[in-house]
Image: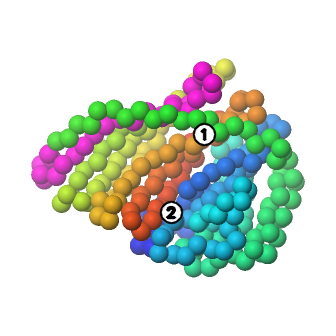
Amino acid sequence: MVLSLLFALALVAAPPTPLQTAQRLEPIGWTADHHAVALRVFFGGRELEVPTCAGYLDAAGKPFDTGLAIVVLRDGVVQTSMEVQAPPDSGACTPPAEARKALDVAKKMLDELGIDRAAPGTRLPVTVARGKVTTRSTREQDLRSTWKETWRARDGAQTPLELVASLSDTVVDDTFHKVTASVSWKRRSAEAERTGTLKLGPIDWSANMGGGIGWTLHAFASPGGDTIVAFLVQTVSNMRGSWSVTRVLPLDAK
């Protein structure tokens, strides 16, 4: 619970939105102009000490241990967000009857926004390449490691999205880490190539209790592939669970 609270405070002063704490994302439809996409957003911390909620089943009938929201992004900006089921770590489970009502309301909202739920688009496969790690001592006798990671989202033989991250991880007293990262991205399309940058950190985490940190790139293409939405999910985990911070990359913002 402490890590979850720290993540929320570091993210924004107000309570984080479901998308900002997403652990899993699934596209469920697009508008005809491909400017807006609807997503299932599984959000909130996964804490092993917190019991899962009865009746929390995804579209495939498999149980999940987070909250669930329906979120619509238009041109990379959240247009609307509706919670269907509260995350277990909030201290309250959503009864199945209430969840069904919320889901019915969400479906009507998607219809009114022109979301075609029969056209979810495509999840692009992502490859990750990690460069050589260089470690040296700082003036304070801490250990600082630096390396690069390259994420590529592929569409057949094409690579419409590439991210290169330059990361630095400073270790204090063998277990406490501080990470910073500078991320540059390229969005390639038939019309043009767009670029951008993103700063991450400083992010504090501990190697105690099997702790670790990592990033995952999620990229979804509209039907036909003309529009891409992408999310960088940063996750800190240990033996008690995992907590995520999710950022939208403004690739095709108009």
Q: How many marks?
A: 2
Q: Is residue 95 magenta?
A: no
Where are the magenta residues, as a range? 137-164
Residue type indicated by callout 2: Val
Q: Residue type at mark 1? A: Ala
Badge 1 or badge 2: first in the primary sequence: 2
Quadrant of the image for the N terminus? bottom left
Q: Residue at x 16, y 42 (%)?
A: 136
Report crowding for label 2: few under 14, some 14 to 19, many 20 or more residues within 10 A (C-alpha).
few
| Residue 193 screen position, x and y as percent | 58, 24
Along the line of sight, which residue is nearer the eye, 247 or 223? 223
Residue 137: image quadrant is top left
Question: What residue lies at 22% left-to-right and 46% top-to-bottom?
Answer: 144
Q: Quadrant of the C terminus?
A: top right
Task: Judge left or right: residue 168 versus residue 158.
Answer: left
Q: Quadrant of residue 51?
A: bottom right
Main secondary structure found in the magenta portion: strand
Task: Please indicate, yes or no, whether residue 102 appears anywhere in the rendered image.
Answer: yes
Name the image quarter holding residue 98.
bottom right
State the mark number for residue 219: 1
The extreme front residue here reads 61
Residue at 51% of width from left, 65% of height from top? 46
Classify mark 1: residues with Cα within 10 Å, few (<14), some (14-19) or many (20+). Answer: many
In the rendered image, residue 196, in percent from the top left (x then y), is placed at 51, 34
Asked if residue 253 can be seen in this view, the reply is no
Q: Nearer the viewer, residue 53 or 3?
A: 53
Q: Residue at image x 65%, y 44%?
A: 76
Task: Quickly name the residue at label 2.
Answer: 12
